[in-house]
Amino acid sequence: MRPLAVFDVDGVVADVRHRLRHVARRPKNWAAFFAAAGRDSPLTAGVDLAHEYARDHDLVWLTGRPEHLRVVTRRWLTEHGLPDGRLLMRPQTDRRPARDFKSDQLRRLSAAATIAVVVDDDPAVVTRLKRDGFPVRLADWVPYERSLREAQERLGRT
């Protein structure tokens, strides 16, 4: 079995900035935010990095996106030529901070395979995963938006 390269989606390979306006102020329009996920532009730096790791790693897509976006997410990954890989998504009722959700998922993955790298754009996730002993790379090619941080870490929505 090849080692795993675990990649986040939003902010790593998918540019969500066009839809952050839906959750930047109250009331938050989660339906519009998620409905626009299929229109995200690819982020070249993240796409290139995913292809680089896919040469000698098995890819796992670990996203805080809710499970109801599985078809949209899988289609988006395919349409943008991203490497195939297992897709792990947030259960509909899971509202934990992204750092907790992802740490739990990685603990399960690491029981069966070696995790070579985790690529994520959320500084809180990166800090937590480093503390947990995972090899992490911060995806810093897009500025990390306050509204996204709130959605991921305080509201547990993505």
Image (cartoon, rainbow, N blue to C red):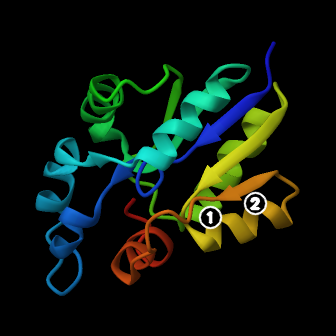
Does 7 sit left or right of 78 as displayed? right
Q: How crowded is mark 1: few (under 14 residues within 10 Å), some or many (20 or more)?
A: many
Across the whole image, how many numbered discs are drawn on residues? Answer: 2
Separation of disc 1 and disc 2 at Cα?
Answer: 8 Å
Q: Give the mark, 1 or 2, whose residue is nearer the N terminus.
A: 1
Contact, mark 1 vs mark 2 (Cβ under 8 Å): yes
> Which residue is found at the position 48% from the left and 52% from the top?
12
Amino acid type, mark 1: Arg
Image location (x, y in percent) of residue 149: 45, 76
Image quadrant holding the N terminus, namely top right
> Which residue is found at the position 63% from the left and 50% from the top?
119
Does 136 sit left or right of 77 as displayed? right
Q: Residues within 10 Å of mark 2 (few under 14, many from 20)?
A: many
Residue 121, compared with residue 34, is above or below; it is below
**Which residue position holds label 1?**
99
Instruction: Give the numbered dot on residue 78.
Output: none
Image location (x, y in percent) of residue 72: 24, 34
Helix, strand or loop at label 1? It is helix
> Which residue is found at the position 82% from the left and 26% from the top?
113
> Which residue is found at the position 81% from the left and 51% from the top?
135
Image location (x, y in percent) of residue 38: 19, 41
**Which residue position holds label 2?**
129
